[in-house]
Amino acid sequence: MTTVPRIFASSAALALLIGCESSRSGAESALAPGVGGLQAPINSPASENNAALSPDELSLYFTSDRPGGFGGSDIWVSGRACVDCPWGTPANLGPLFNGPGAEAGPRLSIDGHLLFFQSDRPGGQGSGDIYVSRRANTNDDFAWEPAANLGTGVNTAGNENAADYLQSAEDGAGNLYFNRGTTGGAAATVDFYSAAVTRDGETRGTAELVVELSDLTTQDQHASVRKDGREVFIASMRTGGLGGLDLWTSTRQSAHEPWSTPVNLGAPLNTVLTDQQPSLSGDGRTLLFSSNRPGGLGGNDLWIATRTPNGKETQ
């Protein structure tokens, strides 16, 4: 029995989002065949990054340095009434999350009760740490409790960010993926680690290097794992890409086996510029990412791709 990667749609089958419409509404444009750039009010003349859909796909969390924030970059959220409805004006998550420094990388748990993010706020272990906030009401984007540092099992004196929480597929073993950076100027590397974290967001041990996904000679970032634990999307500067950071994918036959060698997703998902921070929707059919390719509204913009109708996993 062989597992092959699912594929994303060809340029003819992918929707470009116009006027902030969902790809499910069928809006298309020839401006950027193959992927769609989210329009205003999500993207702006500033930089938008680190997008994540809520489990019901009615909320979109992302990072932006647009005016109206508290620091260098803040976490914002936009809502919509239905999956075919337009996104509303984004709102800043406020001072419980955002401060004078940099907050970024929001990712929600599968059940919607946990929100992981990174921050360089005072009181952490290093230059950037991963935090978690909890809420009881998953329908309220402003019901989050004060965030807690994940502690020394995950955070170090280095830089930890881009957490992705696989809540149930791995039975509590290695279910928080994140990247850890080293210092050293041009020699700096960023690699993937995983740590056991409970369903309540408590760490259960020391994080370990995910060897098969990490290229120890360069920078890897932002793992996004499908909820069954059998497919992951990453960004990497490894050899074989089209530009700086490219989008790659890897699969495995079960959540307890090693990952396959990552495969570059190619054009049109990747360009000669920077394509990064992949984020897979809960149903596995929508991939959000950040890019500075032409056709956007600002520095980095949020882009989206959807699965082909025949892009089902085969056994």
Image (cartoon, helix red, strand yellow):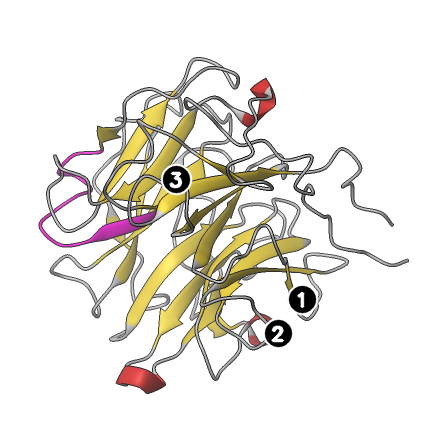
Q: Say left or right for 182 vs 17.
A: left
Q: Amino acid at mark 3?
A: Leu
Q: Main secondary structure of the magenta part?
A: loop
> Within the image, what quadrant is residue 128 found in?
bottom left
Taking depth in this image into account, of 133 and 252 the one nearest to the observer is: 252
Asked if 304 appears above or below 176 in the picture, the reply is above
Q: Position of residue 78 (x, y in %)?
A: 33, 26
Asked if 257 appears above or below 198 in the picture, the reply is below
Q: Calculate the distance from the C-alpha at mark 1 to the C-alpha at mark 3.
A: 26 Å
Viewer can see residue 307: yes
Taking depth in this image into account, of 168 and 243 the one nearest to the observer is: 243
The residue at 69%/43% (across/down) is 10
Residue on which disc 2 sits: 212
Q: Amino acid at mark 1?
A: Trp
Q: Earlier in the sequence, mark 1 or mark 3?
A: 3
Identify the disc placed on residue 114. Answer: 3
Q: Calculate the distance from the C-alpha at mark 2 to the C-alpha at mark 1.
A: 6 Å
Identify the disc placed on residue 259. Answer: 1
- For the N terminus, which image quadrant? bottom right
Taking depth in this image into account, of 233 and 299 the one nearest to the observer is: 299
Q: Amino acid at mark 2?
A: Glu
> Within the image, what quadrant is residue 259 found in?
bottom right
Q: Position of residue 144 (x, y in %)?
A: 27, 32
Single out the residue that lies furthest toward the right. 1
Identify the disc placed on residue 98. Answer: none
The residue at 41%/34% (across/down) is 113
Q: Earlier in the sequence, mark 2 or mark 1?
A: 2
